[in-house]
Amino acid sequence: MFTLIKLELYKIFSKPRTYIAYGAILLLVLAIQLAIKIDGQNILDFMTQSLQDSFDFSGNLLNGFLIAFVILNTLFIHVPFLVVLIAADSIAGETSAGTYRLILTRSVSRAQLVFAKFIANIFYSTTLVIILGILSLGLSVILFGKGDLIVIRSMVNIFAEDDIWWRFMYAFAFGVLSMAMMSTLALFFSAFAQNSITPIILTMSVTIAFTVFSSLNFSIFEWIRPFLFTSYLGNWRDFFDYELNMDEIYLSLFAIIAHIVILYFATLFYFKRKDIVG
Amino acid sequence: MLESAIKVNQLFKRFGEFNALNGLSFEVYKGDIFGFLGPNGAGKSTTIRILASLIKADRGDVFLFGKNLNLQSKNIRNNIGFLIERPDFYNYLSAKTNLEILQQTGGLAKDTRKIEELLEWVGLKGREKDKVGTFSQGMKQRLGLAQTLLHNPGILVLDEPSNGLDPQGIKDMRNLIISLNKDQNKTIFLSSHLLWEIELMANRMVIIKDGKHVIEGNVSELVSTHVAKVEIETNETERLNLFLKQNNISFSVSVERPQLFQLSYAATGVPDLIKQINAANISIYSIKPLKALEDYFLSKTDVHVN
């Protein structure tokens, strides 16, 4: 099985398109960091305008932690789409290329192949989150230094420097799980498609539609919201509450893992029975 | 006692409203070069895909060396190599890397020496590091043949192996296949629309139509019982003309080359015919059967083929 996973990773990292996502993240993070370097103080003043009557701000507020938080807020919405580019190609790409006529006639079961692709895709999405973490947190801390982190959610939370790292680590770990879920969703659609474009479009369409349903506060969508994965993808922010709402966090984790498990087995169920006719 | 290599028993497969296979049965013996013939839509590709476990039959059984494919699909595939239609490789990878991936996907350890030997055998030495995307169709076909041998299987299923090849490529492929059968004792299951190719290579064959078995047997025996076209070349055209009329044998003469006589004659009777012509002292430059298998195929399937 390890060999199969290694081979799937080899296939992924042999394609130039794989590196587009890394390049995109690098460019976007650098662009945001540059913009904050130039205009960051004004933005911070604007953000804290309403608080300045009550609080006296001092020290390096425009620090690496704040910038990392801003970057994550911006990019965690878009990273799923970069993950989908590769995962959607995983099964469908081989269907359209016709390589299953060679691969599936070897002594390998379809279940083994799907599992290898599943793990390889998760590995890829994890590397994206790690790169995002290194660039957004590591590089920002190097460039902008450390300091307290101000997070404005339902409350204004001010975290001391030594209370921040672990929150980011958990947020990134949550991000890894979220991206694994997106990757599995794309893999699921990929099993049904004859080419890579269809699962990319389907995954994106479903994500956009569910995001809209999750964020609109209409009572008609109220009942469906707990069942939509998009209701949980952004819950990495929960780790930036002053007191963690563990029930909320466990629910998010459960929902995301349940989606991964269900989508994986649905993919497996379908692919094992699929006629390779192309 | 002949040992069964492939036994197909009452296979049924339906795609929507279309019955691709309607109880197809046939048997291939160890050591055969077995021709698998049928007109377009007869069910050849469906049968091969079932053998390759790419699709599942609705009903029926396939036995490979006595083992049921439905029950032991993964293990059985260790002993069978497939070249199905045009082989599609990872175009962005080299020939060698493609073979390494296929070798290891099949559960074998990476064996660079074996891969180099195979690439040399199919005439791709020197191109092993080139991306497959740069290969001609003929090179891909040869690489396709190489990949069937990575795990040294006992049976090779070759579906249109001469697809897209030029005449020299077809000849090279034919020689490779014959060598696999004669020198390496591989059982070859060969599907091709080039009937003369089957006639040249296969010892046994089955013809299928509408997903059903039409006839199965020894190629030379089946063809020899059939009334074949024979072409006779002579410079004594008037004497041969008279001889054929006297013996009530219908014939036609080429307008462009009147020394060529074509006649329909039972293949088994051709030796006697030659004796009679010789006895009549008519000089003959050549006598040869024309498209015996093609005629036979057409008579059995009642369709036109190229």
Image: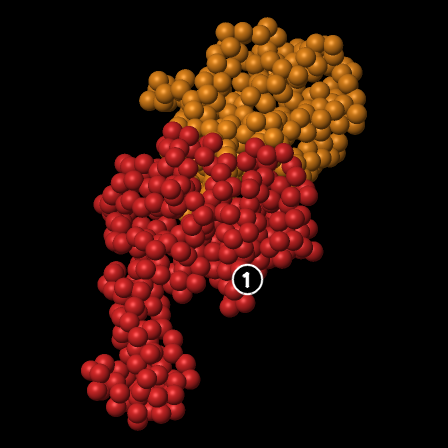
- In this view, the residue in front, B61 or A163, is B61
Which residue is painted at 25% across and 43% down in the image?
B23
Q: Element at badge 1?
A: helix
Residue B260 in picture, x, y percent from top left: 36, 85
Q: Amino acid at mark 1?
A: Asp
In this rendering, does residue A38 appear at all?
yes
Quarter of image, res A154: top right
Mark 1 sits on what residue?
A: B172
In this view, A43 is above or below A196? above
Which residue is painted at 35% across and 38% down in the image?
B62
Q: Is residue B86 left or right of residue B299?
A: right
In this rendering, does residue A124 appear at all?
no
The chain coloured red is: B
In this view, A175 is above or below B259? above
Q: Quadrant of the C terminus of chain B?
A: bottom left
- Binning the other alpha carbons within 10 Å of mark 1 as few (below 14), some (14 to 19) or many (20 upward) gives some
The chain coloured orange is: A
Q: Quadrant of the N terminus of chain B?
A: top left
Residue A34 in picture, x, y percent from top left: 73, 35
Which residue is painted at 29% across and 40% down in the image?
B9
Q: Is residue A66 left or right of residue A271?
A: right
- In this view, the residue in front, A113 or A69, is A113
- In this view, the residue in front, A6 or B52, is B52
Quarter of image, res A52: top right
In this view, B17 is above or below B274? above
Which residue is painted at 69% across and 21% down in the image?
A66
In this view, B65 is above or below A158? below
